Image: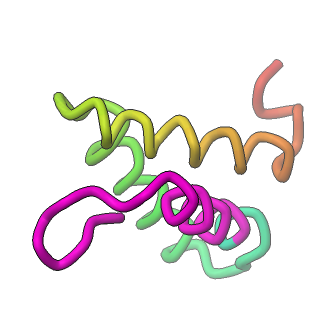
Amino acid sequence: MLNTIKGKTCSLPVKKAGCEKLAQMIATKSNYVVRQLIHKTMMTGLAVSRSSQQRQTFLLFMEQLLPLISSVHFT
């Protein structure tokens, strides 16, 4: 996902910016399919990955997403 063409991981500022944009898309898009695709990719691709870089990307994404969505989902 947030990789360069050569397969190397992106720098931390680039990952943060990408995660911020994805979190904003989930929080603001009314298109259910787009939100579900982002969610599925994050949960199945990054959250459970063996790569620490991909798990770090997931945590950065969650850091950006949590302030944007309702706390009702986490009670």
Q: Judge from the rendering whether residue 62 lies leftward or rightward of residue 66; answer left or right.
A: left
Which quarter shows the C terminus? top right
Which residue occupies the foreground of this view, 48 or 71?
48
Residue 44, relative to residue 2: is it above or below?
Answer: above
Extreme-left residue of the structure: 6
* Colouring method of the image: rainbow
Residue 35, relative to residue 53: is it above or below?
Answer: below
Which residue occupies the foreground of this view, 53 or 49?
53
In percent of width and height, residue 17 lies at: 61, 66
| Residue stretch rendered in magenta on the structure | 1-24
Q: Judge from the rendering whether residue 43 lies leftward or rightward of residue 65; answer left or right.
A: left
Q: Judge from the rendering whether residue 73 lies leftward or rightward of residue 2; answer left or right.
A: right
Residue 43, relative to residue 21: is it above or below?
Answer: above
In percent of width and height, residue 65 lies at: 71, 49
Identity of the residue drawn at 28% across and 30% down: 52
Label tally: 0
Identity of the residue drawn at 76% across and 40% down: 66
| Image quadrant where residue 41 sits | bottom left
Which residue occupies the foreground of this view, 50 or 75?
50
| Image quadrant where residue 73 sits | top right
Which quarter shows the N terminus? bottom left
In percent of width and height, residue 43 lies at: 39, 42
Identity of the residue drawn at 49% across and 58% down: 15
Confirm whether the magenta stretch covers residue 58: no
Q: Judge from the rendering whether residue 23 lies leftward or rightward of residue 75; answer left or right.
A: left
Confirm whether the magenta stretch covers residue 4: yes
Identity of the residue drawn at 71% across and 49% down: 64
